[in-house]
Structures are given as structure tokens and as C-alpha cells.
Image (cartoon, rainbow, N blue to C red):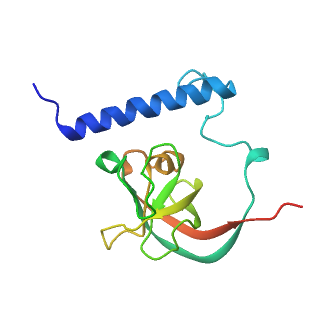
Amino acid sequence: MRMPRTLGVSLAAFVLSSAAAAAADARDGTPARGTAGIGAPDRHITPPAQRAAFQVVGRREIGRASWYGNWHVGRKTATGERLDVTRPTAAHRTLPLRSLVKVTNLSNGRSVVVTINDRGPVSPRLLIDVSPRAADELHMGNAGVVPVAIEQVAAARMQ
């Protein structure tokens, strides 16, 4: 029986991302996903000391966000790079490519800074499409579409 192409591509992306995560865990000594134990910090949350400081430089927009992946993973984005599952990126209609944007999930208060590397979303009802990694950090879960606030940011100069 032949495997549908989308299932095959999704499976391949999952295997590659799992292998990359395991290799990264081996390099930095953090326990693999699922082995941290109860009460251990989530491995996707960056400790405050390691977070980069960002300064808001654009106006705040409120809207709805979805995440895109599946058959989009591995395909070229508007910047020419390929969409992957390891970096928090996003698609927006008008913000400059390669700009940084803070996306805040208004349902749970979680935020992530993404790089705009694609154009979209296709649906006029959506403000932004985020990559699988950004959706994971925002805890979008099975919701698919969540209310968000976005703000263009720039890295603050450290003294």
C-alpha cells in the first residue's frame, strides 16, 4: 500500500526534527523532551537570564493567528529560506521581511518573538500565520486559531 505524499513528508519532517532536538539536547546536556519529569521546567521556555531584550518599535495590532506547517514544511518562503519546525517564524502581509515581531497569545498570555520570513496569511480573517515552533511556544495546541496581539520589536542595545 502506498503512503500518501503528505503523510510521508510530515513523517519525514517529524523524524528530522526529533533527531535535531535529540542532537541539540545531547550538546547542551538538557534532558530529552518527555524525560524532564514532573515539576521540571519546560525545555521550550528560555530562562530569563538568557532572553534577549527587545524594544517595541511598531504599533500594536490585534487579530487572529493560525499556524501553518504540514506540507508547507520544507518549502521555500518569501525570503528564499525553507520553512522548518525548529525556528519561530511567521507570515504577515505587510510587515517587512526579516523583521522581528512579538506575538502574544491573548488566551493564555504566552509570547514569542518571531522573524517574518513569508507573506500571508491567505485568509482575510487572519492577521498572522506562525510556524510550528512558534505555535508550540504560544501553546496554541489544538485550537488552530487564537486571538493574538503583535508588536514589531528590535533588539535593545545592552550596556
Q: Quadrant of residue 102?
A: bottom right
Question: In the displayed structure, would residue 47 be above or below residue 110?
Answer: above
Q: How far across and down, in percent of the image, does residue 25 sit? A: 61, 27
Farthest residue in the left direction? 1
Farthest residue in the front direction? 80
Left or right, 37 with reference to 119 = right
Q: How far across and down, in percent of the image, does residue 104 sit? A: 56, 60
- Look at 68% across and 71% down and name the residue there: 56
Left or right, 118 with reference to 159 = left
Left or right, 53 with reference to 119 = right
Quarter of the picture containing the C terminus is bottom right
Q: Is residue 48 visible?
A: yes
Quarter of the picture containing the N terminus is top left
Question: In the displayed structure, would residue 48 be above or below residue 81?
Answer: above
- Look at 20% across and 39% down and name the residue there: 5
- Look at 42% across and 70% down and name the residue there: 127
Q: Quadrant of residue 52?
A: bottom right
* Number of residue marks: 0
- Report the front residue among 62 and 53: 53
Q: How far across and down, in percent of the image, does residue 116 sit? A: 51, 64
Q: How far across and down, in percent of the image, does residue 134 sit? A: 50, 51
- Report the front residue among 88 and 84: 84
- Look at 47% across and 50% down and name the residue there: 135
Q: Is residue 105 visible?
A: no
Left or right, 11 with reference to 84 = left
- Report the front residue among 106 and 85: 85
